[in-house]
Amino acid sequence: MTGLLGGSESSSPSNAPAPHAGADFPRTTYEDNVRLQHALCTQHLGVRSLFAYVGFSMGGQQAYHMAALFPGFARRVIVLAGSARTSWHNYCFLEGPKAALVNSVDFHAGRYTSPAVRGTGAFGRVYSAWALSQAWFRERCWEKCGYDTLDAYLETAWEKGLGAWDANDLLCLLSTWQKGDITVYNPEDKGSLEKALARIEAKCLIMPSRTGLSCCALPSVPCSTGKERIPADESGRHLFPARGQRGGVQAPETRKVRAHREHLGTHGGRRRRHPRRLQIHPGAGTDIL
């Protein structure tokens, strides 16, 4: 597993030494992340190709970027609730939690000396509505997560959960998300997402959210040969188990992945051990964004 730059585990504003600490940490891109992952595999681990690259949310966006930037390196790609290009709507709604954070009284333009918990807590509260769907709220799914009231869920899972992150780390991740676009690698395509997707050589299993507001399905973008698309959610929640949160991917989604092993060229027989095989699950610990 690899952690996103800015996600508190890999190099991030919160752990970088001077002069790149805190607000002085450079804004990173998916390209930065994917190039480092590719170099880790090929130059340091001697891995020539990946059996599968699996990613959820921002990890799913990374999967698209790996497939686009290094065709053939990942033989299979599984994208869970991710997008090949961040939509303008997605870009815009991220400005909401960002504004709540940067305008908080304890943020101090990113040069805080103690955790900016007012700002990160506000960020979590604002983002919570976008991470879920209208159906999630109608069905009172917070009760399925073990909370008696919606306020208890928001306070624990979002204000305290997401609020426990470093403020500059959150902004670094948000910037990476907003700039996600695989069309930048081939300027001759003039921004055509359809052409960029057609260049992908890996067998792909694309599982967009049907009702979630973060990375919903885009029916106007067709899948090319070898790319299968399966809307994946029941109540449209854009969550993996993370800090302060309970629950994650539902059993129906797991069954759907298993049911499409044939498309990916895998099957449910006994696994053969392969000493040179590495599977990367992008963004571990950061995919609540």
Image (cartoon, rainbow, N blue to C red):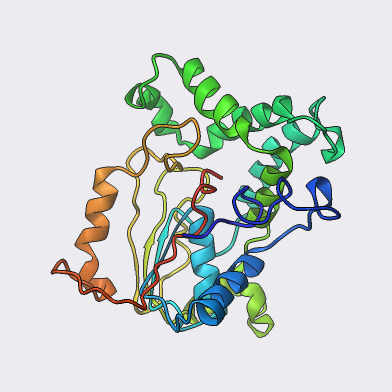
> Quarter of the image holding residue 25?
bottom right
Extreme-left residue of the structure = 269
> Quarter of the image holding residue 165?
top right
- Residue placed at 68% from the left, 36% from the top? 97
The answer to whether residue 232 is visible is yes
Name the foreground residue: 3 vs 77.
3
The answer to whether residue 191 is visible is no
**Residue 93 point in image, percent of width and height:** 64, 42
Name the foreground residue: 61 vs 223.
61
**Residue 82 point in image, percent of width and height:** 48, 56
Q: Is residue 202 left or right of residue 32?
A: left
Q: Is residue 12 above or below residue 97?
A: below
Name the foreground residue: 40 vs 238.
40
Q: Is residue 4 above or below residue 31?
A: above
**Residue 115 point in image, percent of width and height:** 73, 31
Task: Check the picture and name the quadrant holding the C terminus.
Answer: top right
- Residue placed at 63% from the left, 61% from the top? 180
